[in-house]
Amino acid sequence: MIAESKNQSSENFRQDSDCAFDGKICSWQYAGMESIQVSPSLGKKEAYEALLPQIFALLEGESDLIANLANIAAALKQGMGFFWVGFYLVKTPLFAKSKSPTPSQGELVLGPFQGPVACTRIPHGKGVCGQAWAQEKVLIVPDVDQFPGHIACSSASKSEIVLPFYLQPDFEGETRKVMGVLDADSDRLAAFDAIDELYLTRILARLCK
């Protein structure tokens, strides 16, 4: 397949008042990108350079979080060939017990993903995803079997990268809060590095704008 131009943007979409579904007018019509196109001959950096404009085009004009997470996961799976890629979202208790000395931080609950079936819930601070959430930092794990407390959702997973993303504060002075994590797994050891961190961070920054 031929990689798309870096200049690909919202031109892949067009407004079309003739697009209708169940009597509702579609605000945008998909108009040129039938699938993610990244040449398998490209190196990692070049593959991300080809992929990001296509992901940004998918996000253009869409405000629904779940829809965007689903398309990002699908695009990363297709474009980068990850063994598993998806999102876990922070779910906090509706009512905290004020008398508890250690109130619950909530848990990560499985969101949109691509790949084999996955763990549904991950406690705060547990496994790679829970630790990335608790530490609020990117974690790159070259060998998941060597990570203390690793949660093995699939024995085929050998290495992993997890990046937290944030809910932006509504008011000045408020602290931003982790909304969830992006989790990517490979069936190869040491598959992730600073290049993955750089470009996946850019995707999350665009998502949270």
Image (cartoon, rainbow, N blue to C red):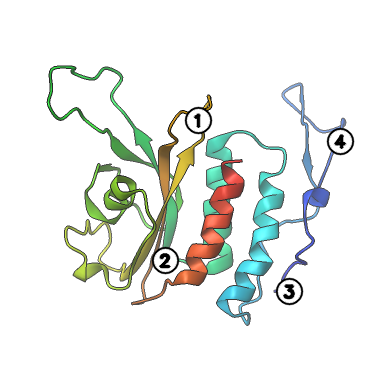
User: Residue at image x 12%, y 26%?
Assistant: 101
How far is disc 2 from disc 3 in space, using C-alphas?
Answer: 22 Å
User: Residue at image x 61%, y 48%?
Assistant: 206
Q: Amino acid at mark 3?
A: Ile
How far is disc 1 from disc 3 in space, using C-alphas?
Answer: 40 Å
Q: Residues within 10 Å of mark 2 (few under 14, many from 20)?
A: some
Q: Which residue is mark 3?
A: 2
Q: Residues within 10 Å of mark 1 (few under 14, many from 20)?
A: few
Q: Nearer the viewer, mark 1 or mark 2?
A: 1
Estimate the x, y position of residue 196 in percent, counting from the top left: 49, 67
**N-terminal label among 3 and 4:** 3
**N-terminal label among 1 and 3:** 3
Look at the picture and state if 93 lies above or below 187: above
The answer to whether marks 1 and 3 mark residues whose Cβ atoms lie closer than 8 Å is no
Q: Amino acid at mark 1?
A: Pro
Q: Which residue is mark 2?
A: 83
Q: Nearer the viewer, mark 1 or mark 4?
A: 1
Estimate the x, y position of residue 149 in percent, counting from the top left: 17, 57
Q: Nearer the viewer, residue 83 or 173?
A: 173
Q: Which residue is mark 1?
A: 169
From the image, which quarter does the N terminus lie in? Answer: bottom right
Q: Nearer the viewer, residue 62 or 83?
A: 62
**N-terminal label among 1 and 4:** 4
Q: Amino acid at mark 4?
A: Asp
Q: Amino acid at mark 2?
A: Phe
Give the left or right position of residue 180, taking residue 103 as reference.
right
Q: Nearer the viewer, mark 1 or mark 3?
A: 1
Look at the picture and state if 97 lies above or below 16: above
SS of the residue at dot 3? loop
SS of the residue at dot 2? loop
Q: Which residue is mark 4?
A: 16
User: Residue at image x 28%, y 48%?
Assistant: 130
